[in-house]
Amino acid sequence: MALSLYLSPRMADALVWLGRYQQRLETMGKETLLQFDAIIDRVPEAGKVLFAKLGSQLDYRCATEFLHEACYGQHSASLLSLSAQARENAIVIRDLLSDSLFGSVNSVYHALKAQENNASLDAYQLAQLLTEIEYFWGRISTRLVKNRAAQFILFGQSLEMIDLKLRLYGEVDTLFEDAHQLNLYGDQLSDNWQHFEPLNQNQSQNMNTLQASMNHIIRYDR
Amino acid sequence: MIVNLSYQMTIAFSSPVRNHQFMLRLLPRLASGIQVQNQQVMITGEHDGGRFYDGFANRLICGQACEAHSSFHVSYQAQLSRSEAPLTEQGLLASVYLAPSKLTSCDDKKLSVFVELPSLYQDSSALAEALSHLVYQRMTYSTGSTNVEHRVSELLDNPVGVCQDYAHLLIALLRYYQIPARYVAGIAQGEGQSHAWVEAWIDNHWLGLDPTHDCLVNETDPYIAFAVGRDFSDCPLNSGAFTGNASHTLDIQAQLTPLRQNQ
Amino acid sequence: MLENNATYHQFFDLFQQQDHSRLAGFEDFMQRQGVTFNLYKDNQFIEQTFPFDAIPRIIPADEFARLSKGLAQRVGALNAFLNDIYGEQKIIKAGIIPPDFVFGSKAYLPAFHGCRSPQDIRTHISGLDLVKDSATNDWLILEDNLRVPSGASYPLSIRRAYRQLFPQLFEKMPIVVSDNYGQLLGSMYEHMNPGGISVVLSPGRFNSAFYEHGYLARISGARLVTNADLFVDNNVLYLKSFNGKRIRVGVVYRRLDDDFLDPLNFHSDSMIGVPNLMSAYHAGNVALLNAVGNGIADDKGIYYFVPKMIQYYLGEEPILSNAPTYLPWFEQDRKFVLENLHKLVIKEVAEAGGYGVLFGSKLTQQQLTDLAAHIQAEPRRFIAQELIEFYDIPTQVDGQIVPRKSDLRMYIVHGKDINVWAGGLTRFAREAGNYLVNSSQGGGFKDTWVMGA
């Protein structure tokens, strides 16, 4: 429908951030499960190292406590907080999402929230929730016609993928495939998209270029 | 009556603003029997069009000045003549101006205590004039003591204010005596700034009353109406909204010069 | 008294055969889809699901046919009234409505006198509240909502879940499909549109009906926007596009009250309005749904006169009646009201949402005396109605099926034609014997099933 072309800066921004938070939630969820295993296997610092990369200081004594802190700790990278952010962005552009897409984002939040005061969320349940997020991506990419809203979400996903790889692993070599994806969506969304080329050495310059790239596709000021 | 009217309205902003949307009631109100010749209007950033009438038959200028600006100007010049026939407008029923309005509503009991009319009046005109005189006597003129949202209920406790407050108090009193009354904003000779007065619906025409100057407003007097309403809140001369964190001050400098009396 | 007809028997026969553990699916559905209304309680923002009861209100085909005619007639007359009040004011000049009832109302906006709504349609989306009187078995109109009637999204959303959870009921009973509401809105937009896209203008994410705003936008082919997405230039309304371009907007289904629409024309401190929106309206470049100033037609004081409007504007007898109503403003009515205060329902004209409603039978002698004094002092502020013993509908409470008072809001979409939607929001009181069904009073909702012939 032609209407899907008509998106304001606010809507485009919410779509991109929905994609970013969904991706961050998925990646951090998977990483949490990996570090959960590492802690069990007697690498007690593993979880702290992970979350420190996103600026969060975690405190725990065992794998279960780590899991709870990762999900519900008072820090901006907690899975509940990432999920709440994804949901807030989904709510304000509700009319652009199908029921199944919205339902997927919303149900992950409610599932996490429901366990908040019950220290018993286990790694198995978390793994289940991550499958729900995989469905989310699946539901976007199986649509016959990718509309503009989907392009913005996927743009956000690619952007976040690169951002996280830089933050978590600092590996520039693995970025070329993701950069290619990002440039593909950037070209679809803007005539003057400036291709993102990961630079070999300069980490902070990579990050800055990435952060500025949203301004190429969304004209915020009027 | 034929007059030359010119004015300069300036809104000065404390820092630059953008996306300034405005709605002005700064054109002579044709429905008040005014005819306009050789009119020149210049407005900061205005497009063509954007001239409408509101429900009170006031002329509106709607527009926007999008670029950053620190001051906003309207300059106006025209020759105006005013019909000397009694003002009998069609359009809104006069009873619209009978119900208490936002700024004039107040406790009837307090109003009745405030009035204490000395005697009975044989007709509505005499009553209206007496009420206007009463407002003039009881009010104390003082600029800066009230704001545009000042209400009659507050005036009854502390009868101090400017022409707008005089007008509101008189409107409340007239309505109390079941005389439809409306607020008039415009320019009067000798005022320099904008002025406010009152019209009362008596014997099927609008009778002009200026309680601030304790006089009637005759068709031959140099008063040019821009807007009427149930009270000020219906017809501000300027409404605006803008992007930017700025305070603003508004100034109107007007000159009203009689040319000659009609033959 | 419990409402009863053959279709309810058919429903219960089928319903009893169903797997009742599936009823939990409704709550799941509403939570997953975020079918909520928002509210503030103790300064905290809460998203709450609207309590739902699966036993529907059932309206037989012949009853719906009559309701349809009656509601379309009423909306037609109310539309004519609005055009008249903001135009020639003939009905006042003719002495049918005392001027005080129009001009003394805050909802009357003289600033928009003479400002015509495109195609002379003002009542685009109405929600009329009805109850079915158990004494006469007849429907009565309780209230007209012509400003921003809400609630249609709840029965619409739940119907989809219902069909998925209990398909047999829909296979075996001739229930008229209700999912055409979005199309009704969409074709009405098209009829009204002076050029451009359609938007649903919401006050924003924290508004109580935000879920509904997004839902209705999606099903009607409109974009959900807030004021930050829109701007006016040279008397044309535009949507800002992400790429710096602008897209013309022709239709605004606004979900905010007149007072907040445009800070230049209404409350100057409105942070949710669009400055100069009214210049686009004056210029005829945008259709506002519903029109500006409609509040005067659903004023409680004006309600009394709606049957007279039908006679005056349409030259027809009203098909649907008002609940018997008295205006203390008229001396004759005042006498009756004061003598019968103990058995009447007294409503304050300015209040809504079940507030300001007093049941004479529940007042003490002192309260009755005080109320009588109030009515005598300010008769214009009140209306009095006879207490309607409206039907209860079977309702599940804690696993038991019990009778509960229920009303019905029906939605009427007025574009090229006046269409009455074959669905509706049935609200029920949560406690036995309570007559107030408003959601603000803790009521719940049911689906409304219109039966096919």
Image (cartoon, grey):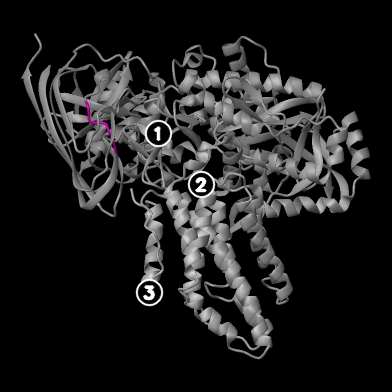
Rendered image: mark on residue C117 = none
According to the picture, the residue beneath numbered tag 3 turns out to be: A204
Q: Residue furthest bottom?
A: A42
Please say whether residue B24 is one of the residues in the magenta stretch.
yes
According to the picture, the residue beneath numbered tag 1 turns out to be: B101
A5 with respect to B4 (left or right): right
**Residue segment shown in magenta:** B22-27
Q: Amino acid at mark 3?
A: Ser
Residue C307: give x, y in percent of width and height.
Answer: 63, 18
According to the picture, the residue beneath numbered tag 2 turns out to be: A148
3D distance between C-alphas at marks 1 and 2: 50 Å
Q: Residue at x 70, y 77 (%)?
A: A119
Q: Residues within 10 Å of mark 3 (few under 14, many from 20)?
A: few
- Contact between marks 1 and 2 (CB within 8 A): the answer is no
Please say whether residue B98 is visible from this viewpoint: no
Residue at mark 1: chain: B
Q: Amino acid at mark 1?
A: Ser
Residue A33: give x, y in percent of width and height.
Answer: 65, 76
Q: Quadrant of the N terminus of chain C?
A: top right
Q: Residue at x 30, y 14 (%)?
A: B88
